[in-house]
Image (tube, rainbow, N blue to C red):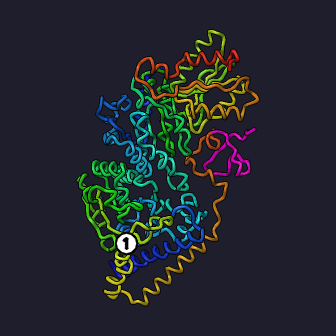
């Protein structure tokens, strides 16, 4: 199977869906002209391929989301790009009070087939440009929240998200855009709401998503050499969450660590740990543990930034500790 | 307009007035809860504007939406039932007073975050433009909406993309309790001028003036001339909501504006003056309106509350195979421990809560 980047996988998904459905449009800041298309190059070239359907917008995230919402109500399938997840805060009212309310509050009269694509990430960009709000998005009823880790998942999930009749928050990651992975040339879709075993193992379950899936896979490789067989459940969809798959794995391994990039307090790890303990308590040989980002506004300095974000070595340490029954 | 159409404008305005007065009465009787923002005084705007639009033009309004729903043809029964929180209401009791809707009539709803619906209206306009439907989107807002960021973002976008949208400011001169000169730095039309947008000031207490202004704006939009901004000067005869003791505005000011009541004015200056109706005709209209609203109250009061089993309906329009309530497994105790109610759009594969 050919290997392509996560960035290219996303672009192929956009291209295929635009070819398939003339109501799919892409709006966002600098998706057309800047650097050939997109601050991170995802939409590069698409404006030329699809005249009038890929448009630069003002830097006004509340309007990008709000106009996208109205257009979705009016019969289009907008894919709105918010340059980074940090800027979704400007559109938070639109997302929570409008996008997420329409279908239920209006009793099924309105559907909102829109996708909001936005990357998590960091890269010496300091406190206001290095954040992660996965747990916030995932706490909101009526949103679907997706966070793919691999090029394969990115493509299949974005295609599904565009075809979905509900609003989908599509969380990409700056550190993943240039990663490579196998993606078949033929078309495929990945259902929203289904986790994926990224590694089968018998000793311990790691529940994770997004960039931390990749770090967890690196950790599993190191741990395998030590004789620890890690199972990795990549959630892929954060809401609605595939709880049955998490439980299936935990009931087998009897140990679980949730690995997330964002802040620990009120993070998604807390929700997952509570869910495991509510529903699989008798299967657990140890408390559910968490690996998470440190709770500070992200510093700029190289060493401080690195200390703040979880990496494979943090996962390795946590797994070793749990296997030594130190939790 | 022919005689029947003019009488219809009058009847619609009167229906809204009587409906609102009776709704206030039902609020006092605790049949209606929460917020109740009444439309008294502003009737000419909804009625005049809707009369100028096609049935498939899009309408998006704020939370003071009863008048718009009734003017667009929603039944008094459905609107009153919604205020009562009943299954027969416009959203089956989900949205209440501030979120009336009827998409079959291209009435896309009342929105309750000040200024929040403006980008949405622009989006409906962009969709119409993209799909070539020829539809115009009318977006009404209060004067208090014209200071928040979404107002400026929406105005800029509408002009930039030449969107067929009509912004109607129902300028009742107060943002909740804060007077215009306390909340805005510049006159209303200056705000439109900042975006080089076609704008008019309109007597919002004159249903014919409203109708004509919206006709002009709709014509412009349909002929590709883009957005318009109509500053409709009006006044609400009651407080901001039923919770407002209305102490900020002087009695003299309110009395002065009541002299310009859009309903009596239309009756006196058009219907009676042109001898289109007699006083007996007007009395008969009032009687029929009062009966219609009384019937709506009876209907609402006798309607059932929405079934508990419907609670999770439409959380998603497209089901997700692995989905359980709330995303994780949570047994809703008030639903008798059922993991999944019989929601049409709610699939629960797992019932193994144990």
State which chain disc 1 sits on: B
Image coordinates for residue A86, horizontal then vertical, percent: 42, 34
Provide the major secondary structure of the magenta segment: loop
Q: Is B205 or B331 nearer to us in this picture? A: B205
Residue at horizontal 64%, vertical 15%? A320
Image coordinates for residue B21, horizontal then vertical, percent: 50, 74
Instruction: Tell me where residue A11 sits by quadrant.
Output: top left
Tell me if residue B81 can be seen: yes
B335 part of magenta stretch? yes
Q: Is residue A19 left or right of residue A230?
A: left
Q: What is the count of numbered marks?
A: 1
Q: Is B332 or B182 nearer to us in this picture? A: B182
Tell me if residue B43 can be seen: no
A51 part of magenta stretch? no
**Structural crowding at the residue carrying mark 1, measured as other residues with C-alpha within 10 Å and reported as few (<14), some (14–19) or many (≥20):** many
Mark 1 = which residue? B44
Image coordinates for residue B147, horizontal then vertical, percent: 34, 53
Residue at horizontal 41%, vertical 30%? A129
Residue at horizontal 33%, vertical 58%? B182
Image coordinates for residue A219, horizontal then vertical, percent: 57, 16
**Span colored in magenta:** B328-354
From this view, report whether residue A58 is shown above or below residue A190: below
Q: Is B311 or A113 nearer to us in this picture? A: B311
Q: In this view, does A294 lie to the left or right of B71?
A: right
Q: Is A306 or B342 nearer to us in this picture? A: A306
Q: Quadrant of the C terminus of chain A?
A: top right
Q: Is residue A62 left or right of residue A187?
A: left
SS label for mark 1? helix
């Amino acid at each position: 199977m050919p290997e392509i980047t996560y960035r290219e996988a996303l672009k192929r998904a956009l291209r295929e869906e635009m070819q398939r459905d003339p109501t799919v449009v892409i709006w966002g800041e600098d998706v057309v002209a800047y650097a050939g298309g997109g601050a991170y190059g995802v939409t590069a070239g698409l404006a030329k391929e699809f005249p009038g359907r890929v448009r630069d917008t003002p830097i006004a995230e509340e309007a990008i989301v709000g106009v996208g919402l109205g257009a979705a109500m009016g019969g289009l399938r907008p894919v709105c790009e918010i340059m980074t997840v940090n800027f979704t805060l400007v559109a938070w009212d639109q997302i929570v009070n409008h996008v997420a309310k329409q279908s239920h509050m209006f009793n099924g009269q309105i559907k909102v087939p829109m996708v909001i694509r936005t990357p998590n990430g960091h890269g010496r960009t300091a406190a206001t440009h290095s954040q992660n709000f996965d747990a916030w998005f995932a706490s909101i009823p009526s949103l679907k929240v997706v966070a793919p880790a691999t090029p394969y998942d990115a493509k299949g999930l974005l295609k599904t998200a565009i075809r979905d009749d509900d609003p989908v928050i599509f969380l990409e990651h700056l550190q993943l855009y240039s990663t490579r992975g196998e993606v078949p040339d033929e078309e495929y879709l990945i259902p929203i709401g289904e986790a994926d075993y990224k590694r089968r193992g018998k000793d311990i379950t790691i529940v994770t998503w997004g960039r931390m899936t990749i770090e967890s896979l690196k950790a599993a490789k190191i741990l395998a050499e030590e004789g620890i067989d890690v199972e990795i459940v990549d959630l892929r969809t954060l809401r609605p969450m595939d709880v049955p798959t998490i439980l299936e794995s935990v009931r087998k391994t009897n140990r679980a660590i949730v690995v997330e990039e964002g802040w620990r307090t009120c993070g998604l790890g807390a929700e997952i740990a509570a869910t495991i303990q509510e529903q699989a308590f008798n299967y657990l040989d140890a408390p559910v543990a968490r690996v998470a980002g440190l709770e500070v506004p992200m510093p700029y300095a190289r060493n401080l930034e690195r200390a703040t974000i979880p990496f494979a070595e943090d996962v390795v340490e946590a797994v070793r500790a749990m296997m030594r029954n130190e939790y | 307009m022919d005689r029947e159409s003019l009488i219809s404008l009058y009847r619609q305005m009167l229906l809204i007035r009587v409906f609102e007065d009776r709704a206030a009465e039902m609020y006092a009787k605790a049949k209606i809860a929460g917020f109740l923002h009444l439309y008294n005084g502003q009737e000419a705007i909804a009625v005049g504007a809707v009369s100028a639009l096609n049935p498939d033009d899009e309408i998006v309004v704020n939370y003071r939406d009863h008048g718009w729903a009734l003017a667009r043809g929603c039944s008094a029964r459905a609107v009153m039932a919604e205020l009562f929180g009943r299954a027969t209401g416009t959203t089956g009791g989900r949205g209440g007073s501030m979120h009336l809707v009827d998409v079959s009539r291209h009435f896309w709803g009342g929105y309750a975050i000040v200024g929040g619906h403006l980008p949405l209206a622009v989006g409906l306009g962009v969709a119409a433009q993209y799909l070539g439907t020829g539809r115009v989107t009318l977006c009404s807002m209060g004067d208090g909406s014209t200071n928040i960021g979404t107002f400026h973002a929406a105005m800029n976008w509408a002009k930039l993309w030449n969107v067929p949208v009509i912004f109607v400011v129902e300028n009742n001169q107060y943002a909740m309790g804060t007077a215009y000169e306390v909340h805005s730095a510049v006159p209303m039309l200056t705000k439109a001028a900042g975006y080089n947008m076609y704008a008019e000031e309109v007597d919002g207490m004159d249903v014919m003036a409203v109708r004509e202004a919206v006709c002009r704006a709709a014509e412009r939009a349909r002929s590709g001339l883009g957005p318009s901004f109509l500053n409709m000067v009006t006044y609400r005869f009651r407080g901001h909501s039923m919770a407002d003791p209305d102490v900020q505005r002087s009695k003299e000011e309110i009395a002065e504006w009541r002299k310009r009541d859009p309903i009596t004015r239309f009756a006196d200056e058009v219907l009676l003056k042109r001898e289109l109706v007699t006083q007996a005709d007007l009395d008969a209209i009032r009687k029929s309106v009062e009966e219609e609203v009384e019937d709506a109250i009876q209907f609402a009061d006798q309607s059932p509350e929405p079934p508990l089993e419907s609670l999770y309906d439409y959380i998603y329009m497209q089901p997700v195979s692995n989905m359980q309530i709330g995303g994780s497994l949570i047994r809703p105790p008030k639903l008798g421990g059922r993991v999944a109610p019989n929601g049409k759009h709610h699939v629960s594969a797992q019932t193994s809560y144990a």
